[in-house]
Amino acid sequence: MKDLETCRKEIDEIDQQMIALFEKRMNVAKDVITYKLAHNMEIFQSHRELQVIEKNTKRIHNDDLKDYAKTFIQDMMNISKSYQASFIPPQNIYQLIPARYENIVVGYPGVTGSFSESALDAYFGSETKRKNYEHFDEVFEALKNDEIDYGVVPLENSSTGAINDNYDAIRDYGFFIVGEQSLSISQHLLGLPGSSLEDLREVYSHPQGLLQSRQFLSEHAWMKQREYANTSLAAQYVANEKDPTKAAIASDKAAQLYGLEILQENIQNLKTNSTRFIIFGKHLETSKDVSHVSIVFTLKHEVGSLYQVMKVINDHHINMLRIESRPLKATPWEYYFYVDFEGNLENQNIILALEDMKTHTITLRVLGNYAKK
């Protein structure tokens, strides 16, 4: 049996050889990326990776070490890809245009008095020209058809989570997040003047309004829950029906606009209830206040693929704010991943990190470069 000191000496000698070979390999990797950039070639080729891993794993004589060797080679290639990514010219990768606030038309779901309209007012100002649409998808269609310059829709509620349809629509339409507005949301039970809780048999609201008030509704189970396209539309409907057995869950502004009475105020589950609204447009934008970037990517369906992206974020000292997964419709049990992190697309470190991430993903798209309010 070798003594410990002898083993350590041998490891030091091996490490010395390995580090020299590592440096030599990385220098060749630089030559490879330089050649590919000069000849406009595909930079990262997954089939080549598999060939290298398979070829080198076969060179291991001790079968017990083959899985470890595979991991070692994969890690070495990941380091090589990260190094190569640093040589990709970052100039003009993202075509950023200045944010617009004047002479614009902004679309929102619902009617006057909706929470989305309140987010519009908070972000752009109450004098901004606007158009309203009944459903979320109609706002996206309106931008697609150039009826509006920007759209405003809710994306996430603090108590009920993400509004996944809007996540998917941003991706599917190819639009970009250009701003974010957070609002404190108070849900109120609205009815006709003179009606009472005991009179009510049906309550109307957007599914999110119902979810955000589920504790109150469970305590008043005699009221049947009816989903409606929007909280403000629900309030308008109740006002028009003039039926004292019907109520809506909506804002106090909706109560004032449609002549309804607040039968019970602040019925949301959490008193700190808030919603993130996104402002989206057709182009990536920038301004002096930009502080957040959103991306969406897909991965190989294999062990460690998500870890590699998270490692890039960590290695570049980027503060990740959230991650959300959504299923790939055509491929069961595989997912899109949405990630928000601090930074902006005029920061060299962020650009390099994104190029590095692309080497570990199948697809990666920047969804937004924006300020939070």
Image: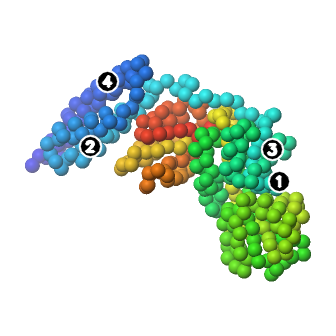
Task: Identify the residue at horizontal 14%, vertical 42% (top origin).
Answer: 61
| Residue furthest to the top | 38
**Which dot, 2 or 3, sits closer to the camera?**
3
- Three-letter amino acid code of the residue under disc 1: Thr
Which image quadrant is residue 37 in?
top left
> Please, what secondary structure does the residue beneath circle 4 have?
helix
User: What residue is shown with label 4?
Assistant: 28
Q: How many marks?
A: 4
Cα–Cα span, label 2 and label 3: 57 Å
- Marks 4 and 1 close (CB-CB < 8 Å): no
Looking at this view, is 3 or 363 the one in front? 363
Check disc 4 and give the amino acid type.
Val
Query: Going from the N terminus, do you reach mark 1 or mark 2 first?
Result: 2
Residue for badge 1: 112
Q: Is residue 86 above or below residue 171?
A: above
Q: Nearer the viewer, mark 1 or mark 2?
A: 1
- Using the numbered discs, state the Cα–Cα distance from disc 1 to disc 2 in whole angstroms: 60 Å
Using the image as rendered, state which of residue 168 and residue 76 is in the foreground.
168
* Quarter placement of the C terminus: top right
Relative image position of residue 198 (x, y in whole percent): 80, 81
Give the mark nearest the N terminus, 2 or 4. Answer: 4
Say which residue label 3 marks. Answer: 130
Q: Residue at x 65, y 58 (%)?
A: 157
The reply, left or right, for residue 338 in relation to residue 11 is right
The spot of residue 104 in percent (x, y) is: 79, 36
At label 3, which amino acid type do we have? Answer: Arg
In the image, taking residue 57 as reference, residue 303 lies left or right, namely right
Which mark sits nearer the N-terminus, 4 or 1? Answer: 4
To which residue does mark 2 refer? Answer: 70
Q: What amino acid is labelled 2 in the image? A: Lys
